[in-house]
Amino acid sequence: MKLFWLEFKRFTTSLAFVLYTLVTVGFILLNVWPMIDRGLATAPVNPTARYDLITTTDFHALKTNALDQLKEEHADSAYVTYPFGFAKSVTLTAGAQAKVGQALNQARQADTRRGLEKALGPVDQLLGGHSDYQAANLQRFAVRPMTLAEARHDHTLIMRKDRITGTYARLFADIASIIVCILPTIVIIAYCYADRRAQVRPTMQAKAMGTPKWLVTRYAASVAGLLIPVLMTALLLLGRVILLYPGAALDYWAFFKAAGFWVLPTLLVSTAVGFLSDALFSNFTGFALQIGWWLITMTIGAHQVIGNYGWLLIPRHNSLHNVSFFYAHYSELAINRLGYTLLAIVFLGLTMVLMNLQREGKYRGLHLRPARR
C-alpha cells in the first residue's frame, strides 16, 4: 500500500497529469453541460412535433434513408467509403455511374430487406467495398423520428427507469469515453519516459521486488489518478442536474455507475496500452498506434451515434433519447465492457513479460528509426 500511494503521489503531481486533468474536465463539461439544460421533465403532448431519432426495425425507414443518401451521392458523383475505418471519397467513371443509377432503380422496387441488400450490393462493389451500402452496414439507415406514442414511452423510461440522472449519465459516459480512449496513453508514456530520463526505473528494478507487484501497483495508481478528473466532472454534472430538478426522484449514483461500468474499461485499455507501448518501444511510437485505433473506432461509431455498442472500444450513445434501444441492448454493452476489461489484463500481462526480459537484459525495446543512407 505504501508503494501504491508513492506512485499515486508521483503520478498525480506530474505535469502530464495536470494537463490531462485540464483537458479532460474541459472537454467533458463543454460537450455535456449544454445538453443538461435540455429539460426532460415535461411529457410530450404535441402530435405534430418532430421528436428525436430512434433506432427502428421499420424496413420502410431503412430503405428511405438509404435511397435518399445514395440518390444524393449519385447526383454529386461523390461517394464516401471507410477502408480501415477512415473516410475516403470515391469518384466513379461514367460507366460505373450508370450502373449505380441502375442499382438505384432496382433498389426502389425492393420490398424486403434481402431485396434491398441484393440491389445495393453491386453499388458497394463498384465503390471498392467498405461503404454504407454493404449489407452489414445497412442497419445504420434504420433510424427515424419518434412518434408521439414512442416519445411518451421514451419519456416514461427516462422518468421511471433512468430517474432522469441516468439519461444524462449515458451522454456523459459517451463523451468521457472519447477522451479517455486517447489521452491516458500519452500521459502514461510521458510518465514512463520521465522516469527513464531521471533513471528511476533502473533503481526500482534493482530492488528485490517482483515485476508483477511493481507493475500492477504502478498500473493501479495510474488508473486511480486518471479516473479522478472523470469523477470530478461526474460530481459537477450531478450537482447541475440536482439544481435543475429540485424534488425529483433522481438516481444520485447514476454518473458514478456510468463512470465505473462504461468509462472505466476504456480507460483500463488505454492505460495498459501506454505501459505496453513503453515496454515494447521505449519511446512514443505506441501513441501513434493508439491514435489509429481511436480514429478507426470514432469513424465506425459515428455511423450510429444514438446507440452503437457491439465491439467498439468507445460505445456510442450520444443522445438523450433512444432509451428503449439502450435497455434492449444492455447485455450487448455489458459483454463489450467485460471484453475490454479482459483485454486490458492481457495487455498488462504482455507488459510484464517484456519487463521481465528487460530486467534480465534480454530485451531493450524496439527502436524504430529511419534507415541510414
Image (cartoon, grey):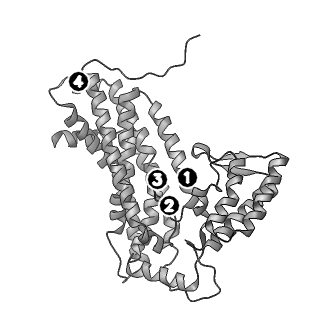
Tell me residue 210's x, y (percent). 18, 31
Where does label 3 land, which residue?
312
Tell me residue 114's x, y (percent). 62, 64
Distance from disc 1 to disc 3, alpha carbons, whole Å, reads 8 Å
Q: Secondary structure at mark 3?
A: loop
Q: Residues within 10 Å of mark 3 (few under 14, many from 20)?
A: some
Of the numbered discs in the image, which one, if any, rests on residue 203?
4
Q: Quadrant of the N terminus?
A: top left
Name the one closer to the observer, 11 or 356.
356
Could you tell me if the residues under marks 3 and 2 are in contact, i.e. CB atoms within 8 Å?
yes
Q: Furthest-top residue in view?
A: 373
Could you tell me if the residues under marks 3 and 4 are in contact, i.e. CB atoms within 8 Å?
no
Could you tell me if the residues under marks 2 and 1 are in contact, i.e. CB atoms within 8 Å?
yes
Distance from disc 2 to disc 1, alpha carbons, whole Å, reads 9 Å
Q: Secondary structure at mark 4?
A: helix
Residue under the point 36% across and 43% down: 271
- Identity of the amino acid at label 1? Ile
Specify which label sits upstream in the sequence, 3 or 4.
Answer: 4
- Identity of the amino acid at label 2? Asn
Where does label 2 land, which residue?
308
Specify which label sits upstream in the sequence, 2 or 1.
Answer: 1
